[in-house]
Amino acid sequence: MSSVETSTPDSTCLCDILKNGTLTDNQTYTISNDTITKLYPSQASPMPITHCPTCSKNNKQALFEFLGTASIVSSRPKDGTDSQRKVIVFDTEKYEHNTSDPLIRVIGTNPHDFTIRTGNLIGYITNKSYTLYVSSRFGDDFLRYMIADAHGFLELEHYGGMSNDGYYWLLIYLWNTTLKQAYHRLGLPKSYINKNEHTAKVRRQLNLIDYFQYKTLGTYQCSYREHSYDTPPIALFIHAHKNTREFPFWKSTRNIYNTLLYVSQGKKRTYKELLSTKHFTNPFYKEYNTLIDLSKKIITHAGTGFDTTHTSSTFLFDVSMLFEYFIRKLIEKNHDIQLQSKYTTRKIPTGGIPHKKRALKPDLVFKGKGKSGLYVFDVKYKYFDFTNGAKREDLFQLHTYVGQWSNECSIAGCGLIYPCKEKDYPYRKEDATQQVRYLQDTLCISNKSIPFYILFLIIPTQHESPSFTTYMNKQCRIFTDTIQSITNNNN
């Protein structure tokens, strides 16, 4: 399992550097003069690149061409459909897919001197010769924490011993928490099935020809529909669960697996039938549709990043999408804060075809309980530059949101929310409760002074905290208390 600060040898092949998780999200690296250097957000010491004569993969031109191919593999296909989507996507009512960017951007044309920029995607792209693996700058513990907490199952913490196979474990972990959430909320999904059989009394539609031919038998051939658990989704979930057993957390859903086996009555379906499983049309079971998609990815080994039996494999994960949803769930837990629907929008003209408009959707619009003024915030899974402040495009975006919402509502405040490593936070103190938890200034929009906040969720590095979950629980409470204090002090 990868850590936040990936340790690497003093010198190694570039193909191994790209494969071992050295590259993390939201960074800039240069490869020049046989060294690799991290430039952003802060420059690090160059790491020498070894020319290994026995490494057949150490071909700079071939490796550069592979990176060029990787840079055009996007999380969202150009035709706008989901058929070739490479990124793990969730229920769109809960998550918003934020980016169509590739895993990396390659700048330069010289295989001996070029730049790699990573963004909000993590994951890997691999082929027979090379693998590019971009890991999370906050580490695997934070990814698990966000998924488990957002799904309501935060009892999971210690999962050592997992193999470092890209982020396939993340797919399995997400599948487990999604199964638990859907099962405990909705029970097992069932569907109508058509039956045609002889019964002792008439059910639904009677076969009249059969009745007159065999009426002495005392039974009636009837066609009817009834609810059944023996459905393709159940079989799909059973098959997917069998593929999770190499990971320690599969035991947390073993009781659900046993229930699935019982209701399936031992009926098996072919691989083709499993992959053709359709979504539930019953809106009550809509939550299970996400699990159907994840199950198909598991059984087709969509995430087996270093599986040499495949010509190529790709697994991309939009962390910014997960972080935004995680922040929403934190705020929703505080009943003194009233959070508006994520789909509360305003539309503005685009200048395109007649009456063409574009919807504006801030990540967070909320107000304090009993208060009238609204707060408009955007969640940014980026580095915050404590010297220069928020990025230009993020400030412009926030100004647009506030300007549009202020046309109809009173705006009590606005701001941006960032994750920040504990060791990078400049306002650290011995007593964590006394730390400065936000930066405050003022925006002037339409001659109105509006409080402007930069809020931080502080995240420890894995090796600095003996209990990551305990520490994160504390930081999340501080974060929600900070928002509540802001809403209480204004209006």
Image (cartoon, rainbow, N blue to C red):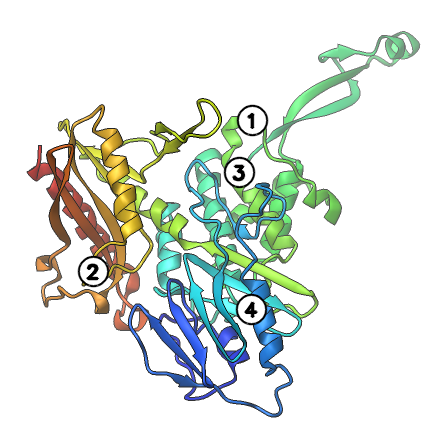
Q: Quadrant of residue 45?
A: bottom left
Disc 4 is placed on an element classified as helix
Tag 1: amino acid: Asn
Q: Which residue is mark 1?
A: 282
Mark nearer the viewer, 3 or 2? 2
Say whether marks 1 and 4 touch (CB < 8 Å). Answer: no
Q: State the residue at coordinates (87%, 9%).
A: 215
Q: Quadrant of residue 415?
A: top left
Query: Which sits earlier in the primary sequence, circle 2 or circle 4?
Result: 4
Q: State the residue at coordinates (41%, 59%).
A: 119
Query: Which sits earlier in the primary sequence, circle 2 or circle 1?
Result: 1
Disc 1 is placed on an element classified as loop
Tag 4: amino acid: Leu
Tag of residue 67: 4
Mark 1–mark 4 Cα distance, whole angstroms, equals: 44 Å
Q: Is residue 136 left or right of residue 73?
A: left
Say whether marks 1 and 3 touch (CB < 8 Å). Answer: no
Query: Which sits earlier in the primary sequence, circle 1 or circle 4?
Result: 4
Q: Which residue is mark 3?
A: 288
